Image (cartoon, rainbow, N blue to C red):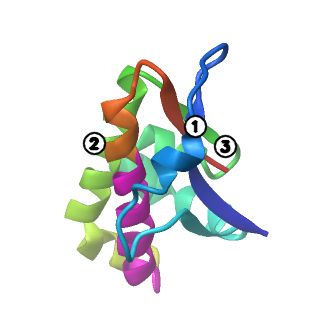
Amino acid sequence: MSLIVSIIKKRDIIVDTELLEAQVPEPHNNLFGFESYREKLWGNDFINELGCKMLYSLGSTNIYAYDEDLDKLRSEFLILLDNLDGVQLHIDDFRDFIEFAAGNALEMIKIALTEKDKVGIAIW
């Protein structure tokens, strides 16, 4: 199975999340890697040491981010991107993938932030 990043609606809100996701510019999409990356990458202690608690939690569970958690998740991706050299030292062979996955997630988050009263982000 594959992990994906999606825009999800808040409870009791009517909004077309597919229309929002269609705004994600090429070459970005909703792909977020293989299920096996949960433990090998996201559950790696180095991710936690960077202070990326939400991303680290993806090692064992899905991420659902709404409201202020959207900004936290965005910040964690930026921290991760700023520390790619360290990631490469601790988690071999994931540098290119992290740039790809983080780019996809950041584009989804950017759109979700424009409608944050209605939507959030799921990584599952």
> How far apart, in angstroms, are the residues tagged by discs 1 and 3?
22 Å
Q: Which residues are magenta?
A: 92-108
Residue 51 shows in this picture: no
Q: Residues within 10 Å of mark 1 (few under 14, many from 20)?
A: few
View extreme (bottom): residue: 93
Q: Which residue is mark 3?
A: 62
Could you tell whether 51 is left or right of 64 in the image? left
Residue 1, image quadrant:
bottom right
Q: What secondary structure characterizes most of the magenta part? A: helix
What residue is drawn where x is 45% and y is 39%?
A: 53
Q: Locate residue 34, reporting x and y percent.
A: 67, 72
Q: Comparing marks 1 and 3, which lies closer to the viewer?
A: 1
Compared with 61, 105 (above or below) is: below
View extreme (right): residue: 1
Query: Which of 39 and 99 lies nearest the eye of the viewer?
Result: 99
Magenta stretch encompasses residue 23: no
Residue 30 shows in this picture: yes
Q: Locate residue 88, reporting x and y percent.
A: 36, 78
SS for callout 3: loop
**Three-letter code, disc 3:** Asn
Q: Which residue is mark 2?
A: 75
Q: Which residue is mark 1?
A: 16
The mark nearer the N terminus, 2 or 1, is 1
What residue is drawn where x is 54% and y is 62%?
A: 30
Magenta stretch encompasses residue 95: yes
